[in-house]
């Protein structure tokens, strides 16, 4: 009987924790303020001025070592 009570208590605690996690993700949101938006825009402009281009998956595969290393 004690094991059954422990299992039921564990399930209830797990469900309550799951509910809190789901509710937190749904109702607690984060929005950037004006200063953060300004910094992000400044960083974006700096990257564009310095010639940064985002790589696609083909470029990444071409530039990384996919063959591994030889032990000898």
Image (cartoon, rainbow, N blue to C red):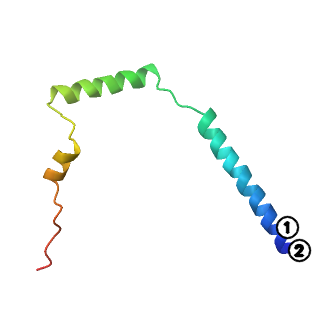
Q: Which mark is residue 5?
A: 1
Does the CB distance between marks 1 and 2 fall below 8 Å? yes
The residue positioned farthest toward the bottom in the image shown: 72
Q: Residues within 10 Å of mark 1 (few under 14, many from 20)?
A: few
Residue under the image location 20 percent in, 41 percent down: 55
Measured as percent of width and height from the top left, residue 27 is found at 63, 33
The residue positioned farthest toward the front in the image shown: 58
Residue under the image location 73 percent in, 50 percent down: 16
**Among the 4 quarters of the image, the one containing residue 10:** bottom right
The residue that disc 2 covers is 1
Badge 2 marks a residue whose secondary structure is loop
Distance from the alpha carbon under mark 1 to that under mark 2: 6 Å
Q: Is 39 located above or below residue 68 in the figure? A: above
**Among the 4 quarters of the image, the one containing residue 29:** top right
Quadrant in the picture for the C terminus: bottom left
Left or right of 57? Residue 7 is right
């Amino acid at each position: 009987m004690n094991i059954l009570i422990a299992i039921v208590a564990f399930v209830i605690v797990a469900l309550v924790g799951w509910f809190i996690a789901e509710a937190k993700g749904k109702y607690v949101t984060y929005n950037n303020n004006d200063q953060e938006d300004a910094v992000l825009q400044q960083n974006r402009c700096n990257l564009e001025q310095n010639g940064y281009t985002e790589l696609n998956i083909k470029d990444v595969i071409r530039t990384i070592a996919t063959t591994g290393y030889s032990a000898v």
